[in-house]
Amino acid sequence: MKGLINTLRNAAQKHAAYRRIVNEISTMSAREADDLGIARTDAHRIAHQAIYGY
């Protein structure tokens, strides 16, 4: 049972981190995103790669 709870907790933490990254990128100004060499439209891809590694 502890394993299941830990798995669920870990998944929730990863999802929260994913949402934070998406939110940060999505709310950047175009200039900030350009300075970082990213497009705000790539927020989901960047967040997924950062959190899940693929």
Image: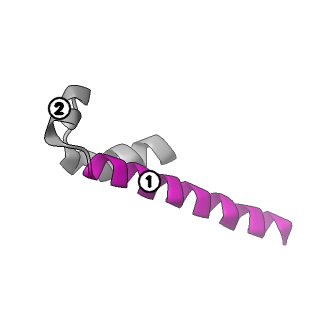
Residue with the mark numbered 1: 20
Q: Nearer the viewer, residue 28 or 16?
A: 28
Q: Who's the residue at 84% across and 72% down the image? A: 1
The part of the image, by quadrant, that contains residue 10 is bottom right
| Label 1 neighbour load within 10 Å: few <14, some 14-19, many 20+ | few
Q: Is residue 10 left or right of residue 30?
A: right
Q: Amino acid at mark 2?
A: Asp
Q: Is residue 25 left or right of residue 53?
A: left
Q: Is residue 36 magenta?
A: no
Q: Which residues are magenta?
A: 1-27
Q: Who's the residue at 19% across and 43% down the image? A: 29
| Label 2 neighbour load within 10 Å: few <14, some 14-19, many 20+ | few
Structure colour scheme: one colour
Q: Nearer the viewer, residue 53 or 35?
A: 35
The part of the image, by quadrant, that contains residue 33 is top left
Residue farthest along the bottom direction in this orientation: 1
Q: Is residue 16 magenta?
A: yes
Residue with the mark numbered 2: 34
